[in-house]
Amino acid sequence: MLAAAVRRVGPPWWIAHGKGQMARLVGNELSTLWGVLGLESAMSKLAGVVCVVCIVVGLAAIAGIVGYAMCNESGHTGANPYLALAVFVPAAVVGVARVTAGRLWRLRAWPGLLAIAIGCAGVALLIYLDRTNTLLQYEVWLARGMP
């Protein structure tokens, strides 16, 4: 009786498919489950919101750093300017994740590309300010022999 049921239904999915196909089936089943529960669209919307938040925070950080560097006549500061990497690196990572994970690449790519650009521009700004001695932490300022 069991043999007849197995012949009728077929072997279980983990036996019928190889390891690569098994992972694909599990991913498809999870995706289908998320779709049934309504979480797939919610996760997509959340990813878009996270990307936009990274863009806004990155732009605010760039504006704040540039404004502070323009107003700071001494060229040194108490805070380490490289702490802003905690904003720019995650923005670039979120942008890369957004670009590579989008199903409709052309429609969903622009926020990710903008986040990547803002992250890279922020890192480049910090390197520029450091190399030109425009905005340095006070201890670094003294170590470089500035007056």
Image: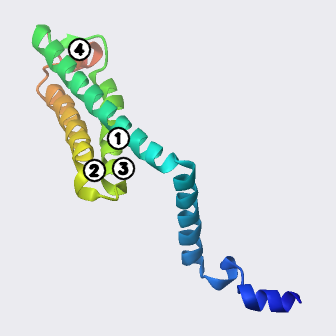
**What's under tag 4, amino acid-wise?**
Leu
Q: Secondary structure at mark 4?
A: helix
**What's under tag 3, amino acid-wise?**
Ala
Q: Which mark is residue 48?
A: 1
Which residue is tagged 4? 142
Residues at badges 2 and 3 in contact (C-beta under 8 Å)? no
> What is the distance, in whole Å, between disc 4 and disc 3 at their CAs?
40 Å
Which of the two labelled residues, at mark 1 and mark 3, occupies the earlier sequence position?
A: 1
**What's under tag 1, amino acid-wise?**
Gly
> What is the distance, in whole Å, between disc 4 and disc 1 at their CAs?
44 Å
The quadrant where residue 5 appears: bottom right
Q: Nearer the viewer, residue 116 or 106?
A: 106
Q: Is residue 126 left or right of residue 47?
A: left
The mark closer to the camera, 4 or 3, is 3
Q: Which mark is residue 108?
A: 2
Which of the two labelled residues, at mark 4 and mark 3, occupies the earlier sequence position?
A: 3
Q: Nearer the viewer, residue 39 or 72?
A: 39
Vertical position of residue 36 compared to residue 95: above or below: below
> What is the distance, in whole Å, between disc 1 and disc 3 at their CAs?
11 Å
Q: Residue at x 25, y 40 (%)?
A: 115
Q: Residues within 10 Å of mark 2 (few under 14, many from 20)?
A: some
Q: Residue at x 72, y 85 (%)?
A: 9
Which residue is tagged 3? 97
Q: Residues within 10 Å of mark 4 (few under 14, many from 20)?
A: few
> What is the distance, in whole Å, between disc 2 and disc 1 at their CAs?
8 Å
